[in-house]
């Protein structure tokens, strides 16, 4: 593939993700989530997605609320300070409309590290004695999905062994998190695909490596030579990135280090409004359907976006209201 | 002018202040502390500005030895990274924790049982839950890896049940799968055993654990509470034979730091009505 052909549009990027794909994302809870692409998936009515994530957040609440997701496999979902749990997941769990699989956070991080390094599993000592390892709570197994039909779904949720090398006791083997597509939201990508992430990089390098296809949505596409001048600052090499999309404010309402803060008001309203399916449908009608990304930004308006804009020295906004005061 | 080292009087501080200060006092200087969002973050930053100036702060999202100036609203917040030694990722943070560097973790929970098992996953039958919660996050990981873990919780009888609906995070007596028989945590963790829950700070009091029996006992009760009243607020038979007294209230200096330096915008803690 020539470097120029990596550049695609938001809607072309969404088309790469097929019904039934195993999908994962960049970021951490309410930070650097590719929401612009998620909205586009909802507009394109993608169905039967299997989300597998180190941790989850508003982006997955959008997809789950819109009925795009059959399986949610992760460890956490919510909106941090702005909404205490994932109301859309909770509703669909209660109504048995979604399969949920719980691991611990470290287990999920180690599962992605395993996939990223081509290892079938990693060994860890976390969460021993908890219900995460209760054999009755293997939900993919209960749903008959561990039958080998999808080669990316492991045959077991976990496997416990005794350390064969040092005699250090019980170890949990957690299976590699193999994914079809990873979508990243980052600050900068080079025109050949080199990724530079400012601030904490969360599990983005592992996530990109674990996937068969990696799509990078960036606030800006910059000349490769610029990024290659200081290659020690880059996190993902060009050849691990298959497609690139330039899309300012691609993570809104989640935050982007050095570019903009979390839109807490938006998240709080979303959390409150989408406790019911009717509320979600109204939200989607107002903020997703009938809009493209430009329309969405227009609707948010310049003053609101300006308040969220990060101070370029501090890397966060000094004008955004965060508390009661 | 008030002597800032003096203890404040009832009415001059909130329950949130009392709990934050109780949490801060769990921190020892020079320790490596794994910080969660909310009140724990204020408690740790308070400790950093009082008795533990050399504590090292690790944030789950990847910041190692951060020295935030402004209160982060979550561990993914750029505010965590100010003054940090290294800004990295989750694999780094969890590897460091599993390697044994973490002395103390601060966590929360929806339910806690007598042995310190905590639930943050679902209320009711896990297969048919009444309410699906956020899920584990790093709760079991931090608690599995740290030498001590402190839980901060709202105290209601239903939140202190005989058995939690789902063991998200391991206490002192845990389940040995695949049979599910109860065993002491030490037995299951073997060489990876470093400790366990060391305190629960609730809206009613401060609780600790007997590391041999694994049972929770009441250490201090908050002003206005009594050991008997708190025992009534637990579904299990709470040990109140080891009570050391009332929870020590904040000093004027600590109240000043909480409301004028650390959380002036009332992101997590509301100011007392009259100050």
Image: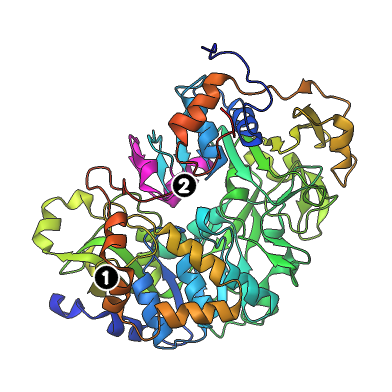
Residue placed farthest to the front in the image?
B274
Nearest the eye: A304 or B178: A304
With respect to residue B146, does A174 lie above or below?
A: below
State left or right for residue A53 relative to residue A159.
Answer: left
The residue lying at 10 percent from left, 53 percent from top is A229
Give residue A107's quadrant in the image.
bottom right
Can residue A166 be seen by looking at this rendering? Answer: no
Q: Position of residue B243 (x, y in %)?
A: 82, 24
Q: Position of residue A150 (x, y in %)?
A: 53, 83
Nearest the eye: A246 or A176: A246
Tell me the number on the disc at residue A323. 2
Residue at disc 2, secondary structure:
loop
Mark 1, residue position: A241
Q: Which residues are magenta?
A: B72-99
Can residue B9 be seen by looking at this rendering? Answer: yes
User: What is the distance, in whole Å, between disc 2 and disc 1 at their CAs?
Assistant: 39 Å
User: Is A267 contained in the magenta span?
Assistant: no
Q: Nearer the viewer, mark 2 or mark 1?
A: 2
Q: Quadrant of the C terminus of chain B?
A: top right
Residue at disc 1, secondary structure:
loop
């Amino acid at each position: 593939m020539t470097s120029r052909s990596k550049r695609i549009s938001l809607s072309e990027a969404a088309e790469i993700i097929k019904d039934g794909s195993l999908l994962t994302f960049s970021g951490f809870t309410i930070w650097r989530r590719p929401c612009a692409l998620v909205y586009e998936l909802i507009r394109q009515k993608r169905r039967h997605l299997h989300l597998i994530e180190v941790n989850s957040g508003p982006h997955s609440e959008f997809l789950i609320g819109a009925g795009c997701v059959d399986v949610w496999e992760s460890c956490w979902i919510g909106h941090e300070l702005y909404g205490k749990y994932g109301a859309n997941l909770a509703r669909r769990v209660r109504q048995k409309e979604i399969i949920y699989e719980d691991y611990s956070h470290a287990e999920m991080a180690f599962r992605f590290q395993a996939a990223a390094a081509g290892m079938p599993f990693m060994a860890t000592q976390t969460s021993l004695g908890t219900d995460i390892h209760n054999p009755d709570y293997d939900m993919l197994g209960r749903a008959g999905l561990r039958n080998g039909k999808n080669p990316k779904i492991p045959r077991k949720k976990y496997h416990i062994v005794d350390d064969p090398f040092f005699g250090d006791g019980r170890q949990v083997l957690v299976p590699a998190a193999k994914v079809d597509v990873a979508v990243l939201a980052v600050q900068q990508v080079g025109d050949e695909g080199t990724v530079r992430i400012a601030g904490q990089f969360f599990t983005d390098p592992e996530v990109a490596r674990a996937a068969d296809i990696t799509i990078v949505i960036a606030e800006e596409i910059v000349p490769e030579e610029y990024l290659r001048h200081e290659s020690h600052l880059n996190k993902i090499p060009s050849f691990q990135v298959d497609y690139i999309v330039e899309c300012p404010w691609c993570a809104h309402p989640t935050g982007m280090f050095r570019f903009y803060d979390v839109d807490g008001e938006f998240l709080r309203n979303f959390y409150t409004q989408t406790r019911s399916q009717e509320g979600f449908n109204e939200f989607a009608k107002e903020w997703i359907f009938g809009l493209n990304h430009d329309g969405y930004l227009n609707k948010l308006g310049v003053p609101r976006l300006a308040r969220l804009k990060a101070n370029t020295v501090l890397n966060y906004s000094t004008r955004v209201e965060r508390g009661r005061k | 002018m008030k002597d800032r080292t003096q203890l404040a009087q009832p009415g001059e501080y909130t329950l949130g202040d009392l709990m934050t200060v109780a949490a801060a006092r769990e921190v020892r200087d020079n320790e490596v502390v794994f910080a969660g969002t909310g009140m724990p973050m204020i408690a740790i930053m308070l400790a950093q500005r009082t008795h533990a100036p050399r504590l090292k702060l690790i944030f789950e999202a990847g910041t190692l030895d951060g020295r935030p100036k402004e209160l982060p609203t979550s561990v993914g917040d750029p505010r965590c990274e100010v003054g940090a030694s290294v800004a990295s990722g989750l694999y780094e943070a969890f590897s460091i924790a599993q390697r044994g560097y973490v002395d103390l973790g601060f966590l929360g929970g929806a339910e806690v049982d007598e042995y310190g098992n905590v639930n943050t996953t679902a209320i009711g039958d896990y297969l048919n839950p009444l309410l699906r919660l956020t899920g584990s996050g790093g709760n079991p990981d931090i608690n599995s890896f740290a030498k001590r873990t402190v839980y901060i919780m709202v105290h209601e009888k239903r939140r202190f049940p005989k058995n939690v609906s789902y063991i998200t995070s391991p206490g002192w007596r845990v389940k040995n799968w695949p049979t599910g028989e109860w065993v002491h945590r030490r037995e299951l963790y073997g060489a990876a055993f470093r400790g366990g829950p060391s305190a629960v700070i609730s809206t009613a009091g401060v609780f600790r654990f007997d590391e041999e029996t694994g049972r929770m006992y009441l250490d201090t009760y908050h002003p206005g509470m009594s050991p008997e009243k708190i025992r009534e607020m637990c579904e299990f038979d709470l040990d109140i034979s080891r009570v050391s007294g009332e929870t020590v209230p904040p000093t004027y200096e600590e109240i000043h730091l909480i409301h004028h330096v650390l959380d002036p915008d009332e992101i997590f803690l509301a100011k007392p009505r009259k100050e």
